Image (cartoon, rainbow, N blue to C red):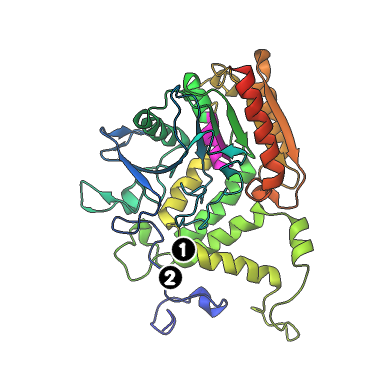
Amino acid sequence: MSMNEAGGAPSLGSRRDWPDDFPVTGAWREGDDPGSRHFLELQRPLALEGGDVLDEVTVAYETWGALNARGDNAILICHALTGDAHVTGGGGGTYTPEGWWSRIVGPGAAIDTDRYFVVCANVLGGCQGTTGPASINPRSGRPYGSGFPQVTNRDIVRSQACLADELGVEQWFSVIGGSMGGMAVLEWAAMYPDRVRSIAPIATTLAASPQQIAWSAVGRLAIANDQWFNGGDYYDQQHGPANGLAVAREIALIHYRSDQEWVERFGREPLDRLDRFDPWGRFQVEAYLDHHGKKFPYRFDANSYLILNRAMDLHDIGRGRGGPAKALARFTGPGITVSVTSDFLYPAHQQAELAALLSQGGRSCSYHMIDSVFGHDGFLVEHDKLAPLLDEFFAKVRVETA
């Protein structure tokens, strides 16, 4: 039975062949298969930048390789908005079963798990094992829902620093990440400069731009206006705001990719008959968006999307620090940043500005451009172009900081 037949407001099934049985949330919850996850329970409350305090915090993470006797071979990978800790190695991730960067990370790969001890943690506020809105609030015994506080990238990095302490990592050989992950990389350099030997912020920015904030805002509105959102307290309902979450995902995919890719891949080819000007007849590009929209609610949580998406909007490395140059002045290690030619969401000038800032005062930050039609997602897709750049960078770091 569809929502229309049940008497609810019209669902997107009225114009899209979407399931009626979307889950209330795609969050990992206690009792679910942990896969390759490990869990760290913080031993003290976590104070947040906004003034709130989380009494209990769990950090879900995965590791590959081993920390060497000197403790100087650890690499932290920071995932993007809808990623998770499952970077590589099978074991059943929620992003992709083989891992979302499996051709970058692994034995003999650019991030070589035979050489490095590699760590990735699901971010604070996320939905794949780390404490977030779908987690149980110890004060109420119910999911946080609307009561979960807004977190920032600085809060995320503080939780990752607690994980580093637990793992015995005094200094990361490198901290790496793209997009939202790149924001966390920069926060590591600003907050813990002595604990970071090198950084690789990819396809990211010193501060969220008005255009980035605007794209994010409409995606969040799609969720907030879903009939089942209920102000964020939907976990005990029959339905969650899955339709709104799916639309938010489709909106995001439009600016994650590029016009050139859409033209080359789909053109104006129809999927449905359009000869009668059916208002809901689809072009092939619409079918592609719908395919990914359908998948997303099974692996993500709407509240986490709102929290983390807003954390990206709030990103400004210079906020409260006298500007970006002062914020990063204490970090003296080498860096690398990479742009994608067709990325109009995080355009190349943002990474060029970042590289110029990190090259001041005798520091070293190399800047590279990947030629790709895959837009912002190029850093996730163009493994063969990104891997050699990282491999070369790590070799230089080993020599320069030996």
Question: In front here: 66 or 5?
Answer: 66
* Image quadrant where residue 121 sits: top left
Residue 105: give x, y in percent of width and height: 57, 43
Magenta residue span: 176-186
Residue 275 figure quarter: bottom right
In magenta segment, residue 184: yes
Quarter of the picture containing the C terminus is top right
Per the image, label 1 sits on a secondary structure element best described as: helix
Residue 297, label in figure? 1
Q: Residue at x 43, y 37 (%)?
A: 156
Question: Is residue 288 shown in magenta?
Answer: no
Going by the numbered disc 2, the residue's amino acid type is: Phe
Mark drawn on residue 236: none
The residue shown at (68%, 82%) is 278
Residue 182 left/right relative to 367: left
Left or right for 56, reference 14: left
Q: Is residue 331 left or right of residue 1?
A: right
